Image: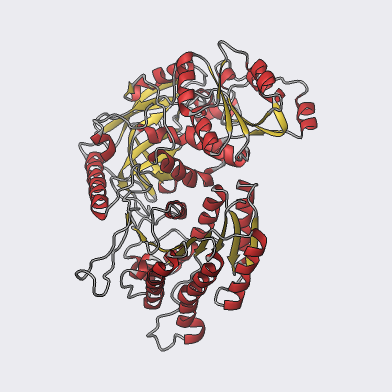
Amino acid sequence: MPPAALITGVATGIGRAVALALAAKGHNLTLLDLDENGMNQTAGLVRSSHPGVEVVTQKVDVTSTPAQEAAFSRHMTKFGRLDVAFLNAGIGERGHVLDPGTPQAGGWQLTLDVDLTAVIVGIRCASIHMESTGGTIISVASAGGLFPMPAAPVYASSKAGVVHFTRSIAQGLSKKGIRAMALCPEYVDTPLIRSVIENNPSHAVRLLGSLDIKLLQPDYVADVVIQMLDPKYPGGTCMRIRQTGELEFPTFPHPGKGKPGSGTPVPGSTTSSTAVRGLPTSPGQAAAVGAAQRAYQAALTAWAVANPPTTYQKIQVHTLSSRFQDATRLVQVPLGPGLSAPAGALLLRRVAVGINASDINYTAGRYYGSTQAAASKLPFDAGFESVSVVAAVGEGAKGFKVGDPVATLTYDGFSEWGVVPARQALPVPRATPDIVALLTSGLTASIALEVAGQLKSGDTLLVTAAAGGTGQFAVQLGKLAGCHVIATCGGPDKARMLKALGADRVVDYKTEKLKDVLKKEYPKGVDVVYESVGGDMFSAAVDALAPRGRLIVIGMMGSYAEGWPASNHPGLAEKLLWKSAAVVGFFLLRYPHHFRPHLQRLIQLLDAGKLQVSIDPVKFVGISSVPAAVERLYSGASVGKVVVQLANDVPLPPRQQQAGGAPASRL
């Protein structure tokens, strides 16, 4: 029987992110909220992303004790078990309590009822239904429960009550196998916070301290929640998520035991934006990791603004051609005056860029709708992905500061410096080549398999060109999802890499025919195909589809250099019809709203040691080496992601400093 979870406050923000995260872990869900529209939207996202998960929704006012009790009972009737209760329902301050015009009923009393009393009722209900089986109860208490909030005293006292109620009952519940914990994030990017910032800036400044604050992302908070499900976190854990992403575990004095301020520490972690490999096991160790991360940030800040040139180099397309070297020129453009960025934008000093098969489609003008449209844009910039460091922040560009490492997915990545709208920049924990590999290549695999392919545990997954930049991630994500993975490649070096990544069956097309292997060894067919080659490889994959199979077309690399002639697959519709199968096209830039959460998950998997990044061993340095790097990709000899390092003197993150500068993720 699958695990089951009940979540309150699911209409937006943290509750929605946690629902998706628990569904990804195979939990059936009961979703509770007073906002029925938002709740149903969350349920729809869960069902579309994880079709094997059962989802029940109930419109519930958590301030009604009978309504909460009935909701928990209905959950048990439906699923027969309660493994996780995530109590997230909450509201903000309803007028200042000392203002004579603020009513008690419907005003500050409602904040107490929702943010404290309803949580106590929820913990009580959950503990009753977990009594015989055990389980985990996580209450969202907010960092506002740990420090004074003059702008929101009732909210702060309610959240403080949640913290201390949870810690006070944790010992008794632990004896029954129930872990009760409190989650205390600082300011999270939720509709509530955004509304305050946009509609009442002066109050937002009093509440947040600044309008330039970098808000935590709900998906990151959800990742922390998933970490807290690990039994290493005992009942009574109070998890504070700092605005920097660092995790802290406040300790509290216990009457009559030890000196004031003493307490029992719990396992901890400090991180800039994701969980790091090898969690620190003590507050002291966590502090050391935090200090190293702050030193890295300071070094990046100094590097980003050191000795700025008056001009810089970038690659521009001057002639439409699928031969990259013929189509492009290296041009010199002015940087100054000074380091500045336009309003709402960031000036970036680029560190590394990635090479993709579709780079030659772009230089040939194939993404402009017509040759005439592309020709009218000449000359234009090129390069789909990069990692950079912020060198200047334009007026009104919120959430970034000089020295922040960022990733971009734009059309001007092949450039030593660049200006991008702040809304297009993706925060990342470090500016390193492994992050570049996670962008176009990693995001394509992650989003395509989940959204377009609807991949689920137990599926048989075929990945073509599996030793390439994106194929390597499709193989690993398939294995992490519980699938049997067939991987194609050309040559023994690539085959060895794929076996090391966990592929169940590697097909070297230079020594075996894929069609014959699939027909003989997989007579029932394959459920999902991740296809990037085209031609005969596409035809073999279509023929091997199982009933209701899904083939995702992410590219046709085999025909790009020939001008991308139209495909010809007679009988395709008939083959799909009788199998009820589907061929789905996937173009990454159609899914921008998925970029941030999927990138955060990929980085977390990488830093937890669950995902490897293979970077091609041939090293390319400097913007002038980009054409040679493109040639390397199309030679068929590259193994893994082809990356060009634009700057050699960029500071290394703490883990790579300890490893002598070698990328820990390179196979």
Q: Nearer the viewer, residue 374 or 347?
A: 347
Q: Nearer the viewer, residue 418 or 272?
A: 272
The percent position of residue 234, horizontal first and vertical second, equals 38, 59
Residue 176 drawn above or below residue 332:
below
Q: Nearer the viewer, residue 70 or 58?
A: 70
The percent position of residue 98, horizontal first and vertical second, equals 37, 85
The percent position of residue 367, horizontal first and vertical second, equals 56, 30
Horizontal side of 298 relative to 131 (left or right) equals: left
Q: Nearer the viewer, residue 599 or 130?
A: 130
Quadrant the C terminus occupies: top left
Please tell me in which quadrant of the rendered image residue 172 appears.
bottom left
Residue closest to the far top: 511
The percent position of residue 157, horizontal first and vertical second, equals 38, 76
Please tell me in which quadrant of the rendered image residue 193 appears.
bottom left
What residue do we see at 62% from left, 31% from top?
Answer: 460
Q: Is residue 264 visible?
A: yes
What residue do we see at 48% from left, 27% from top?
Answer: 378
Residue 652 drawn above or below residue 323:
below
Horizontal side of 55 relative to 619 (left or right) equals: right
Residue 548 drawn above or below residue 275:
above
Residue 563 drawn above or below residue 615:
above
